[in-house]
Amino acid sequence: MPASTLKEPATDPVAQTLKRRIGGYAKHGNHEAAASTRRELDLHQLRKHIRRVVDDWPPLTIAERDELAALLAPGAEAVRRAS
């Protein structure tokens, strides 16, 4: 059974810690820190998602890898074309 179809454990200690921090910051009115930590949580979840997709995907060709990298770094494509 592919890993992506398995139910992931509900406990992610990093995500839980970040969520608690967000709640604490918001409760005490530190909205800037809450927003920054929320972005950190979003990035953590995105990393986990990307890792799951990459682990389940067949090996990429160099062209496919470059195309996906360009999606993550749009400025890199313009630099590559200018060279």
Image (spheres, rainbow, N blue to C red):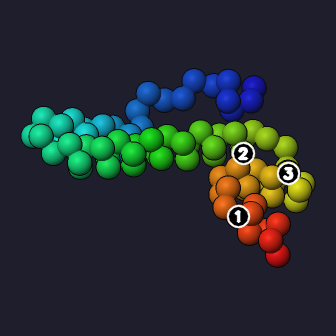
Image coordinates for residue 57, horizontal then vertical, percent: 79, 41
> Dot 1, how many residues are within 10 Å of its Cα: few (below 14), some (14-19), or many (20+)?
some
> For the point 63% across and 44% down, which residue is it?
50
Query: Mark number for residue 24?
Result: none
Instruction: Residue at the far bottom: name it.
Output: 83
Rate crowding at label 3 as few (under 14), some (14 to 19) or many (20 or more) other CA atoms within 10 Å: few
Q: Nearer the viewer, mark 2 or mark 1?
A: 1
Residue 73 occupies quadrant: bottom right
- Say which element carries label 3: helix
**Badge 3 is on which residue?**
64
Residue type indicated by callout 1: Ala
Left or right placement of residue 44 versus residue 75 in this view: left
CB atoms at circles 1 and 3 under 8 Å apart? no
Question: Residue 9: horizontal and vertical position, in percent?
Answer: 48, 29
**How many neighbours does mark 2 have within 10 angstroms: few (below 14), some (14-19), or many (20 or more)?**
few
Q: Quadrant of the C terminus?
A: bottom right
Mark closer to the observer (1, 3): 1
Q: Quadrant of residue 6?
A: top right
Q: Which residue is mark 1?
A: 76
Q: Is residue 18 visible?
A: no
Which amino acid, by three-letter code, is at mark 3? Glu
Q: Which residue is mark 2?
A: 54
